[in-house]
Amino acid sequence: MNIRRIFLIAVPYLWLGALFLIPFGIVFKIALSDGALAIPPYIPTLDFSQGWAGFKDFAGKLDFENFRFLASDDLYWKAYLSSVKIASISTLATLLVGYPIAYAMARAAPEWRPTLMMLVILPFWTSFLIRVYAWIGILSNEGYLNQILIGMGLIDEPLTILNTNWAVYIGIVYTYLPFMVLPIYAALEKMDDSLLEAAEDLGCSRFSAFWLVTIPLSKAGIVAGSFLVFIPALGEFVIPSILGGSKTLMIGKVLWEEFFNNRDWPVASAVAVILLLILIIPIVLFQRNEQKQREAEE
Amino acid sequence: MKKYMLSIATGAVIAAGAVSAEEVRVYNWSDYIDEALLEQFEAETGIDLIYDVFDSNEVLETKMLAGGSGYDVVVPSGTFLQRQITAGAFQPLDFDQLPNAVNLWDVIKDRTAQYDPGNLHAINYMWGTTGLGVNIGKVTEALGEDAPMDSLALIFDPANMEKLADCGVYFLDAPVEMIPAALAYIGEDPDTQDPDVLALAEPVLAAIAPYVTKFHSSEYINALANGDICVAFGWSGDILQARDRAWEAENGVEIAYNAPAEGALMWFDMMAIPVDAPNPTGAHKFLDFIMDAQNMAAASNYVYYANGNLASQEFLVEDVIGDTAIYPSAVALENLYTTRPYDSSVQRIVTRMWTRIKSGT
């Protein structure tokens, strides 16, 4: 095996190790500890000066008590479930809004595309927090949206949107839209237009050509965009705490409470470990499925 | 000679640069100081002041227990201070560096000693009560002339809350404030650590939670001042700031702060120096600056909270020292209660109860 190849393989694995496995190991270790009133607020802590004996002593004090605790209270699985629901609906809504935008961008005249791309990216230049806060002014009972709707005579009473799950959906769709648009745009832009012409020549209507040619060819972009939206939305904390109400149950908020109100880092870490499993299992299953399909095609 | 002068000037500039490179990092509650004082501190000492704010004790405590916060001065409330001292988060103060400590008020020191025996780790910054912020016009409109504006019944009687829900009610998002209040309302000991007694607070709070617009610990200042809500259960000085902002805006909103007749929680915000503060000397300078009678008076005059500084009282404006909502009379002081920190198993019960109350889950 040549050195170049080893090097090429080593880089992503080092990356994965340094930025994922080691931090995960630290979180997992804390999840097996017990809370304590100390700095840091858990025991045991690893004492390197004791060498191997110290490590054995340390490992002996770890247990799965915190995971058992999570199973004993229905708050946690309800919060996980509610987060999955909110993230799924938001991802779907982002896709429905984002796909037409990406499609229009890819269909636009080539000289316009950089400008359109710029317009999608431009909102990022304003702080994320400010953009989310701005929605308070739009969605509140006295906000712009209600004023416009009342002014147009569509409603008599202001709609209560702020501090409900609706505001959370709107906030997530708005914030994550570019993450959906850009990968789909990248996939659509590469598409060869002559394929569509061929489809129409072969008797496809425009709609079925879109459905049978464009959608499958942009599948990679749809999948990438959906992951980019779903994964951060699942653990989202800022948007539900600013726009959501006290009834909005999301795992990010539960994590915050474990961490800050209960000062229970071990339970908070256990919540985080489970959250990671919820994310990783479907992704691994999905990739395995993809792999099988690819092999079958070959 | 000219060259010589130039080099002196350069030296002076470098020296000034070196002095101003000294930093003190302060982490205090939001809306809690006259910002002119921060500039004054920098001008007097030549130290760069980096001033960050928080709005919950829990956030501060997590930073303290994580260690390495980088702050030189932090401001936990009494109960949290006590627990963090136990965890070893604070260094004992060096009173040789704090000549202004003679200005402190014994009445307050006696009470804060229950959290920090001997007052060795912290000085009192401000103290106050937790109570009812009322938009007089809107509440009268909703409940009539005889609305119980100085009673916890205003917020804990579902019949009242149902009528107030439409105009908006904010609660502190702090179980350590709301649960003792609910216990005081039903005549139980607000300072209880007994899970069975604490559980009695849950039905009281659960019955009215659906009518609460928002649980939040700082937004209510603006919401009250703008007239967006009619009642807030919050901290005395914050509500008085809202009253003042409304008055300045001349928007016709009239706000009052009432300590509940059933008893109000009295709390103390304490300035302390973390054990790993990068600049403890600068931190002491900041504490001494704050304990200066005129500076402390300027802070109280600005934020409408009482302070633990006896010497500052002669510099307080009549609006502050003369207002019994800020400096309660001796009789009213007896109606105030204090609480002790929950231990970790009780804290978990309290947090879980609070989540259940807020989200119904």
Image: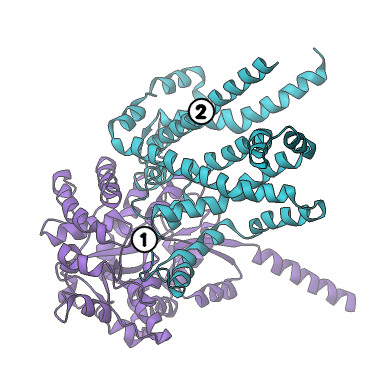
Chain colours: A cyan, B purple
Judge whether B292 appears above or below A178 on screen.
Answer: below
Who's the residue at 68% across and 37% down the image? Answer: A214
Circle 2 residue: A282
Marker disc for residue B56:
none
Who's the residue at 37% across and 42% down the image? Answer: A258
Q: Residue furthest front?
A: A203
Q: Quadrant of residue A82?
A: top left
x and y, in percent, of residue A112 in the image: 78, 56
Is there a contact, CB below 8 Å, between mark 2 and mark 1? Answer: no
**Chain of residue at mark 2:** A
In front of the other: A227 or B109:
A227
x and y, in percent, of residue B305 in the image: 34, 74
Circle 1 Cα neighbour tier, 10 Å, few/some/many (<14 / 14–19 / ≥20): some
Type of amino acid under label 1:
His
> How many marks are shown on the rendered structure?
2
Q: Quadrant of residue A174?
A: bottom right
Circle 1 residue: B216
Mark 1 lies on a secondary structure that is loop
Mark 2 lies on a secondary structure that is helix
Mark-to-mark CA distance, 2 and 1: 36 Å
Q: Quadrant of residue A283?
A: top right
Who's the residue at 28% across and 85% down the image? Answer: B322
